[in-house]
Amino acid sequence: MSNDLGEAIRSLVSERGISEDLVLETIRGLLLAAYKRKFGTSDNAVVQFNEARDDVQLFARKTIVADDDLEDDFDEISLSDALELHDDCEIGDEILIPIDPKTFDRISVQSAKQKAKQDLREIQKDTLYSEYKTKEGEMIIGYYQRELNGDMIIDLGKIEGTLPKRYQSPREIYRKNDKIKCYVYQVEKPEHGQLRVILSRTHTEFVRKLFELEIPEIYDHSIEIHKIVREPGYRCKVAVYSNRPDLDPVGACVGLKGIRVQTIMREMEGERIDVLRYDPDPLEYIKNCLSPAEIKRVVILDEKKRTAVAVVEDSQLSLAIGKQGINVRLANKLADWIIDVKTLDQYREMDLDIDTKERVDALFTDLPTFEDAYIEEGEEDEELLLSDISELSKELVAKLQFHDIYTVEEFVNLTDDEIVSFGDITTEDVRVIHNVLGDYVDIVEEEDASEVEQQFLCPECGHVLSPDMTSCPNCGVGLSFEEVDVDEE
């Protein structure tokens, strides 16, 4: 029996990964269950293993009483019977009486075996759960076995893992016993059923673990990964930065002639990987996120809404957007900004308000500014703003701007009476403004010239006339005004 028991224990320890103590505890439980099934209780049952732990004995503990005092032969034994088992026993001692399990009925043994099997399953599940739970979030290597309803079953050694269809890369195809690296996404221990180890090859953490395996500078934290985004099977972007000023994070990740990143790409079955530098400046970071396209300028449209425009040359537009928009889509996720990619011509056609347009246009040296547009249309001089004249008080300028008078030209085109008629500007205010403007424009000469040009006299009575009169208001003679060319004297 000892050989059979020892072999069974060693088998459970090696094949199922159950510790020896837990196996012995299960055997103890099996014998106690059978004992209880036969006698109704196991309170006085004792299970003992030998030092080699390859043999076990079951005893009933009983108290020695005088022959005349024996009342309960389950917990007690008479002195005469005890002396047959041991010579030195006395009344009041406890003695262990061997019990042969073979004497148990079949139902008791079968019930005990069933409980032992259930205990072993639970112990094995707990043991494996404890072991694989610690591997959650780590990389693991297994061997592809078969497909079940689209899911891949992976042999992990002590247990089979599941690589669900939704966590498989569309590029990957495997044959039986092909080696496969997986990310341990989740370990589940259901109340009923087998332990489940859920694997993944599409999570971004899978890429992070590959970088840690292939790039020592990432493993020792000389280089940190800021963020990873990917569309599994097609493209992945990794933003990195260095904790050492003398270490180029992108160059270290790519490796000499790209050998490091190419090793990772091969493991990912050819999925394209863009390694770029993280920058705390959003303008520079957005540029980097759109690599490998060359971005001419990034303009922040709304910082609160995190919207921006990336302006590129026509030849870089398709590269910046990527096939089916994948490059700009991943850049949006990586930068956490809503990025719109435009060419220079498309940018000019954007529906922006004038202030934004002026401010944004000024960023581009090759784009005409809002003021340049007037010059292109033939405007030789910019209009002088009243607000640019420091001698005018801010109160007076504000009053004029309230009535839509912003420039000197707009002011001088109005008569004094028209200005005073606004109500909040006095005659003294108008005089002060004229005195100040006299240093900038010759207003008096313009007004005198205007008066000369506009004054006409009646040929009959000499009364002052205006061009809109059809007859003289003084003498009644009919009038007609015509423009004639006058040669210079």
Image (spheres, grey):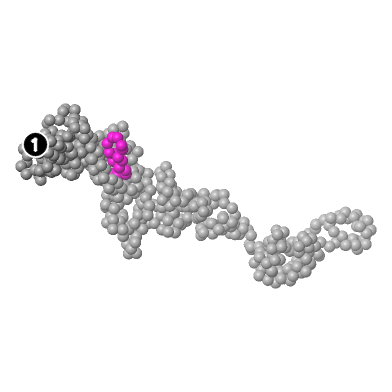
* Residue 244 coordinates in the image, percent (x, y): 33, 63
- Name the residue beneath numbered marker 1: 81
Please tell me how crowded label 1 is: few (under 14), some (14-19), or many (20+) other residues with Cα within 10 Å. few
* Residue 369 coordinates in the image, percent (x, y): 56, 58
Count of marks, rendered view: 1
Looking at the image, which residue is at 25% across and 45% down? 131
* Residue 380 coordinates in the image, percent (x, y): 63, 62
With 398 as the anchor, is 85 left or right in this view? left
Task: List the single residue furthest toward the front.
Answer: 68
Q: What secondary structure do most residues of the magenta stretch adopt?
A: strand
Q: Nearer the viewer, residue 241 or 481?
A: 241
Residue 454 belongs to the span the image colors magenta: no
Quarter of the rendering occupied by the C terminus: bottom right
Residue 257's quadrant in the figure? Answer: bottom left
* Residue 115 coordinates in the image, percent (x, y): 22, 34
Is residue 279 something that shows in the picture? yes
Q: Is residue 196 above or below residue 284?
A: above
Looking at the image, which residue is at 16% across and 44% down? 20
Looking at the image, which residue is at 31% across and 38% down? 190
Residue 39's quadrant in the figure? Answer: top left
Is residue 487 something that shows in the picture? no
Q: Nearer the viewer, residue 85 or 157?
A: 85
With 58 as the anchor, is 155 left or right in this view? right
Q: Nearer the viewer, residue 343 or 335?
A: 335
Q: Is residue 369 above or below residue 54?
A: below
Quarter of the rendering occupied by the N terminus: top left
Q: Nearer the viewer, residue 211 or 54?
A: 54
| Secondary structure type for disc 1 | helix
- Point out the stretch of residues depicted in magenta: 180-198
Residue 414's quadrant in the figure? Answer: bottom right
Please name the amino acid that badge 1 sits on: Asp
